Image (cartoon, helix red, strand yellow):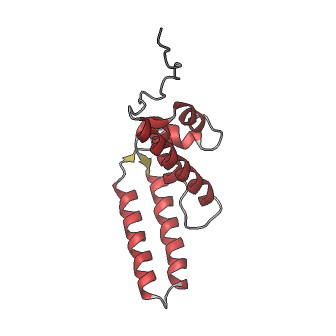
Amino acid sequence: MPTQPPPQDPPTNGSSLHRSRTVRVLLWAAGSVSLALGLIGVVVPGLPTTPFILLAAACYAKASPRLHGWLVNHRWMGPMIRDWETHRSLTRRTKTVAQVSMVLMVGLSAWGFRNQPVVLGVLLLAAVIGVVVVARIPTRGANQS
C-alpha cells in the first residue's frame, strides 16, 4: 500500500503553493533574504523596510503557508501586510512619507558621495526609480481604510 504525503496546511489568503518543490525552495530563500533585509532596514537609514517585508510575505504565500501566516499575524509586521493584501494600494499619506523619506535620505547620501560622480549617478538613478515606483502604486482614498 503506497504511503501518502502528509497533509499540508491550506494556503492563506486564497493563494496556493507553487507546484514545483524547487520553485518553493527558491521562493522560501528569496522570502527569507527579503525578510532579513527588511529587518535590517529598521535600523539602517536609507534601506527600506516595508517593500522587503511585503516581498517576503508574497514569496512565503507561494512557498510556505506557515511562514506567511506567521508574518500576517505578527504583532508589528502583520498590519502592513494585511493592509496591502486587502487593498493593494497605499494611502496618500503613506506614499508621501515614503517618497519624502527617500528623497531626504538620498539627499544626505548624495552629499557624502558628491566627489564620486559614478556612485552619485547610480544613487540618484536608484532614487528616481524608487520615487517613480511608489508613485505608480495605486492611491487609496482616506475613506477606504
Q: Which residue is at 46% across, 44% downward?
A: 27
Is residue 144 visible from the viewing direction of this image? no
Left or right: 25, with 139 as reference point = right
**Image spot of residue 42 (x, y percent):** 63, 58
Residue that lies at the very extreme toward the bottom in this rendered image: 115
Q: Is 1 rendered above or below residue 77?
A: above
**Image spot of residue 56 (x, y percent):** 51, 46
Residue that lies at the very extreme toward the top in this rendered image: 1
**Image spot of residue 89 (x, y percent):** 40, 45
Q: In which quarter of the view is residue 66 placed?
A: top right
How many numbered discs, if any? Answer: 0
Q: Is 117 rendered above or below residue 82?
A: below
Q: Which residue is at 46% across, 63% downward?
A: 99
Q: Nearer the viewer, residue 48 or 15?
A: 15
Q: In which quarter of the view is residue 134 placed?
A: bottom left
Residue that lies at the very extreme toward the front in this rendered image: 1
Q: Nearer the viewer, residue 17 or 95?
A: 17
**Image spot of residue 69 (x, y percent):** 56, 32
Is residue 109 visible from the viewing direction of this image? yes
Q: Nearer the viewer, residue 124 or 135?
A: 124
Q: Which residue is at 37% across, 66% downward?
A: 129
